[in-house]
Image: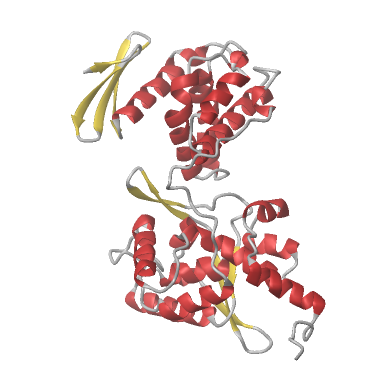
Amino acid sequence: MARSSWGSKRQRSKGVWELRYTVNGKQQSKTFKGTAKQADAELARLRVLHEDAKAPCDASTTIGTFFWGDFIPECEQRVEVGSMARSTLSGYIRAYTASIEEPFADTPLGSLAYRDVQDLLLGMTRGKAQHAKSLLSIVMQRATDKGAIENNVMRRRFIMPTMTSGRERTKDVYSTKELEQIFEECRGEIWEGAFILGAFGGGQRAEVMGVKPHEADFAEDGAGDVWAVVPVNRGVHLLDGEVVVEEHAKNNAREDVMVIPPPYSLRLRQLVRAALKRGDEWLMDDGFGEPTDPEAMTRAYGSWLARSNHRYVPFGNLRNAYSTMLHAKGVPGDMVSKLMRHASPITDQRFYNRPGPEERIEVLGRVFGEGYGKDVP
């Protein structure tokens, strides 16, 4: 049985641990599923809840005590009321245990030094450093809001590393032409419906995996064209190896609808009708009445691209391609933001719109008109 400074853990089977600890002189135990490191983190959290959290929060409170005793319980409350996605909470915990806990868990909130944070970030890959800095900034800002500290060191500027892990997601996006070609060629693939919703509706992976066929609506406009209107009201995630359905969107702004234009809406209607005829509960059904594993879907998507003549662009970047396509076609920026379901137009411009030469030519073509680029003999 492995012991820590507070409590102990014992492995009962692969990935299953018995945590034992004392509360007010009484022995307590809890079964926990996860890795040994995650079990240690859970013990640390329990200690904060039952021991350290009794003390008032001030500048002398350690980052670990504040994280487990104040920050995480507040996040859990937000998850309960639907203002935060459970995947966001899980991401906070993963980032903390992976990057922040070891160097700073015992550091008082008021003693976090700029140089220590900077040294930590420069020793990481770029992606890992971005996650660590973002989380530490959120945690320290919350400590500032609660009056525990006045001087928040995370408000200062940091030099970020340039080293990558080789696994960092590319920023490439498909052009409209490439999206249309893949749309024509991917018929019958298990990820086809998800692709349509992502590439032509701006759906994020968790959102498109959570679509149920009976919720999709199809309506004709004045010209007789059929459009699809698909609500976003849940997400499907893979958390700790388990497919989890969250019955709410990522945030209030994202809980809206995806609007898919023709001709993509017509194919989506065929897929919806086929799913309803089979009695499927989900558009991306696994055949047993449950949603398909999101990772399995994206693996199938990647395998198909590897066998095709198309370059590989991550499924998550389809949302970027959708934004870029809308801008190139002249959709006003504020409407693009609404279609992307962003709380602020700034989000779209900073992170999603990625025009390449083709999109820039399409935009400038409307400004300079036709005929100016013809070669003169």
Q: Nearer the viewer, residue 287 or 263?
A: 263
Q: Position of residue 261 (x, y in %)?
A: 59, 77
Residue plotted at (50% across, 39% down): 163
Q: Nearer the viewer, residue 106 or 6?
A: 106
Residue plotted at (56% across, 20% down): 116
Q: Position of residue 351 (x, y in %)?
A: 63, 52
| Residue 41 against residue 245 in the figure, above or below | above
Q: Is residue 4 left or right of residue 142?
A: left
| Residue 335 against residue 152 in the figure, above or below | below
Within the image, what quadrant is residue 50 found in? top left
> What is the residue that sits farthest to the left in this orientation?
13
Quadrant for the N terminus in the image: top left
> What is the residue that sits farthest to the top in this orientation?
25
Q: Nearer the viewer, residue 34 or 103?
A: 103
> What is the residue that sits farthest to the bottom in this orientation?
377
Q: Position of residue 12 (x, y in %)?
A: 19, 29
Q: Is residue 329 left or right of residue 186?
A: right
Residue plotted at (38% across, 75% down): 275
Residue plotted at (52% across, 74% down): 178
Residue 259 in view: yes
